[in-house]
């Protein structure tokens, strides 16, 4: 069986997990690993007992002469994504990029159009979209088990890691926004965000900035076309680690709690029966929903390879899906810097 030759660019905190999955993939041959830190490359070689034939290099440019290279996996800081992805596509390589695709919606659209012209796969690693709990949750919502949907909420908090390239909004919000968009089958039409900076304040340069520096705490409100609203709490300096998201309906609440290993997806049944002028809770019970097993990131990596083999863009986490999410994050940044001013989004635009 001929294996697809892959290069992994960036083997930091997340890139090492992508490398692990591609090294284990039966249809993949990892032929090169790129990281600017030589000591990191040595450590990776020892950690995975890498074959001597795998090229370990510090410069991306050295890959251009590598024969029969098919795809590259990019897990570098978000600020480097645009030039790396553009160069890779121009060289004729399929690309799987860590989220976000870039930090600029215009750059995202340009890369998606370039991939289409080159007839190449451009996929973004939005891992939660491949989580069995998210897939099962979408089915529950499609079946109407919650009744009329009322609102959504989520919390994503932990004590670090604190990033220096993007704030807590860009680091954390994309996961929950992606899940809400998928579960609701809609994109938000209005967004709002407020935040607080404690750790990394920016130096003032003689002009007024409402939010100066990288926000450690961010509160997000998403409003969808049917007036459904989702509220998101993001913080990277809170030792109360939470990864919890819920949607409330007239007949119950669907909860995805990643920290609950025994029951990550739960349906809390319950509604009100009116007795005179009183509202009495009825039909209350907890239903733990069974989900498939399997590592979500492994599914991401496998979908990338299948997409290459079948020459079919992945619908779940394509470059265009990544672009939609970046557009939402960019709008939220505008709101964040204007102390929560509502920002309206056009969701009628056509891809390409």
Image (cartoon, rainbow, N blue to C red):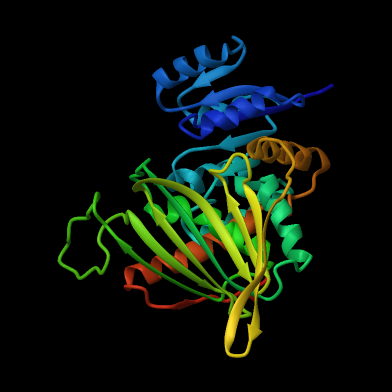
Does 88 appear above or below 273?
Answer: above
In this rendered view, identify the residue nearer to me: 134 or 118.
134
Question: Left or right of 234: which side holds 62?
Answer: right
Q: Quadrant of residue 131?
A: top right
Looking at the rendered structure, the number of numbered marks drawn on it comes to 0
Q: Quadrant of residue 162?
A: top left
In this rendered view, identify the residue nearer to me: 52 or 265.
265
Single out the residue that lies furthest toward the left: 206
Single out the residue that lies furthest toward the bottom: 276
Q: Position of residue 225 (x, y in %)?
A: 62, 79
User: Residue at 61% across / 45% down in the picture?
Assistant: 127
Does 187 appear above or below 27?
Answer: below
Is residue 92 at all visible to an observer of this figure? no
User: Residue at 52% across / 64% down in the picture?
Assistant: 153
Question: Left or right of 52: which side holds 289?
Answer: right
Q: Quadrant of residue 18?
A: top right
Q: Position of residue 12 (x, y in %)?
A: 46, 31
Quadrant position of the C terminus in the picture: bottom right
In this rendered view, identify the residue nearer to me: 16 or 147.
147
Quadrant position of the N terminus in the picture: top right
């Amino acid at each position: 069986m001929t294996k697809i030759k892959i290069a992994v660019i960036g083997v930091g905190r997340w890139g090492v997990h992508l490398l692990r999955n591609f090294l284990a993939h039966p249809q993949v041959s990892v032929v090169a690993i790129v990281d600017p830190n030589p000591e990191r490359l040595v450590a990776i070689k020892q950690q995975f007992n890498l074959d001597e034939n795998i090229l370990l290099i510090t410069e991306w440019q050295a890959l251009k002469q590598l024969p029969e290279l098919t795809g590259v996996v990019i897990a570098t800081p978000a600020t480097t994504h645009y030039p790396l992805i553009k160069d890779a596509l121009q060289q004729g390589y399929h690309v799987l990029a860590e989220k976000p695709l870039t930090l600029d919606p215009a750059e995202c659209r340009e890369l998606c159009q370039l991939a289409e012209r080159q007839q190449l796969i451009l996929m973004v690693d939005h891992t939660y979209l491949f989580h069995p709990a998210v897939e099962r949750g979408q089915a529950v919502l499609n079946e109407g088990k919650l009744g009329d949907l009322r609102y959504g909420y989520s919390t994503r908090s932990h004590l670090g890691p604190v990033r220096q390239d993007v704030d807590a909004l860009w680091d954390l919000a994309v996961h929950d926004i992606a899940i809400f968009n998928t579960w609701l089958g809609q994109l938000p039409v209005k967004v709002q965000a407020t935040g607080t900076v404690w750790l990394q304040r920016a130096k003032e340069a003689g002009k007024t900035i409402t939010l100066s520096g990288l926000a450690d705490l961010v509160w997000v409100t998403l409003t969808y076309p049917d007036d459904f609203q989702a509220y998101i709490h993001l913080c990277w300096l809170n030792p109360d680690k939470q990864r919890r998201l819920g949607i409330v309906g007239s007949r119950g609440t669907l909860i995805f709690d990643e920290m609950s290993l025994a029951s990550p997806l739960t349906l809390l049944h319950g509604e009100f029966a009116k007795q005179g002028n009183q509202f009495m809770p009825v039909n209350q019970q907890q239903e733990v929903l069974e989900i498939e097993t399997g590592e979500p990131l492994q599914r991401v990596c496998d979908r990338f390879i299948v997409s290459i083999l079948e020459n079919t863009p992945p619908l779940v986490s394509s470059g265009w899906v990544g672009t939609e999410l970046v557009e939402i994050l960019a709008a939220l940044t505008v709101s964040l810097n204007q102390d929560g001013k509502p920002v309206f989004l056009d969701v009628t635009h056509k891809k390409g």
